[in-house]
Image: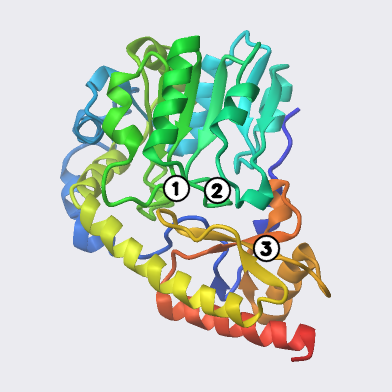
Amino acid sequence: MFKRSKLEEWYEGKNPEYDISECGMVNTINLNQLTDFGKYQSLNILSDYGNSNGEMCLINSICNIYGCNSENVLITNGASEALFILLSVLCDGRSEITCQFPYYYPIESFFNRIECDIKWFVPELDLQFGFDIEKFKKVFSGNSDVALLNFPNNPTGIELNDNDYANIIDYAERTKKIVIFDEVTALSVNKTYIERNIHYHLDNCVCINSMSKAYGIPGLRVGWIIANKTTIKRCQIIKELISICTSPVLQKISYDILKYRHYIINNNRKIVLHNINSLVRLINRYNFFLSINCIPQNCSFCLVKNHGRIIRDYEFCTKLYESYDVLITPGACFGLEGCFRIGLGINPDSFNNAINRMTAFINDCYRL
């Protein structure tokens, strides 16, 4: 039986005045400035299912990013569907998968359902979630033929450097294993290592991404899979069974938005930079019980450690919401105790107001 995500349970029923719990950008672009919604009314695309693999205009735009061919792309309903389809295909008949911990998607219930064991690769917290390539190779061995990695990692913010990526891919190719790179949180102006190089390694590398986090448009529910032709064909069969296709209208809007990719990412990075500076000032003020393990470089969230001398993280987040109408995410939602995730992807004025309320809340809790 599938179990519900602890993250979704946390969000349920909450409607805060200031929501800094999300890991993606939130309401930071004006869609009316980037796309002409009116033109879609005359295209007769609302009466068609559309292509199950995706609309060619969007596929070609994605091909330009990754340097791949159209046969290597499948458009999905967000990254969640992409991941569900990929895991269904790549883990079919396998007894074990290696997965990075923490991972934001509730994959445990999925693998329990198909009777596939998870080997967790757990970075050392005292190394600031640093990536240990040798430890990863040791875990990603034996019966484990597929690994699932998310960088920048949600919720820790850890990133890989180009050398790490090259070592992981080299190991996968030498051992004939498959690595799934989940890049939905990557907020990078320049192309990521995977975007620049995956077309050279499609026999052993797969990538998923979406319009939701870095672009800040989760309501479009548009994502994609980059893989070799055989994997894409197998994924397309499952997609046709569960959703037939992704809305042609939303794909054409996504195509329009991707024309402004660099403008959007640049603007969003400026917002994150402003907000992380505000957050760091808060952390420095209360460094007797708060700290940051990893300052985000290419993502829109931050994991804050709560050393909890008076109030623990789940209680901290609950009371902050109930008393000051500010929502953040407790680490327990990701299987991490003693920390919480703060989203940096909202309007700076709103973020500053949220930080001011957190300051008042902390002063109240600690009688400062």
Which colour scheme appears in the figure?
rainbow
Would residue 6 appear left or right of 269 to someone viewing this image? right
| Mark 1 to mark 2 CA distance (whole Å) | 7 Å
Asked if residue 129 shows in the view, the reply is: yes
Mark 1 / mark 2, whichever is N-terminal: 2
Q: Are marks 3 and 2 in contact (CB under 8 Å)?
A: no
Q: Front-most of 171 and 17?
A: 171
Q: Position of residue 22 (x, y in %)?
A: 53, 59
**Could you tell me the amino acid type at mark 2?**
Asn
Element type at marker 3? strand
Dividing the picture into quarters, in which one does residue 210 lie? top left
Mark 2 neighbour density, 10 Å: few (under 14) some (14–19) many (20 or more): many
| Label 1 close to label 2 by CB (< 8 Å) | yes
Name the residue at 59% across, 78% down.
284
**Residue 32 lies in quadrant:** bottom left
Q: Is residue 109 above or below residue 91?
A: below
In the rendered view, tell whether residue 289 sits above or below residue 233.
below
In the image, 149: left or right of 122?
left
Q: Earlier in the sequence, mark 3 or mark 2?
A: 2
Picture residue at 69% right of the left edge, 18% below the top: 116
Up/down of 55 relative to 277, above or below: above
Mark 3 vs mark 2, CA separation in Å: 15 Å
- Residue 48 in view: no
Amino acid tagged 3: Lys
Q: Specify the label residue 219 is tagged with.
A: none
In this view, the residue in front, 31 or 347, is: 347
Looking at the image, is mark 3 or mark 1 nearer the viewer? Answer: 3
What residue occupies the far bottom of the structure in this picture? Answer: 368
| Residue occupying the point 35% across, 33% down | 194
Residue 277, position in %: x, y? Answer: 45, 74
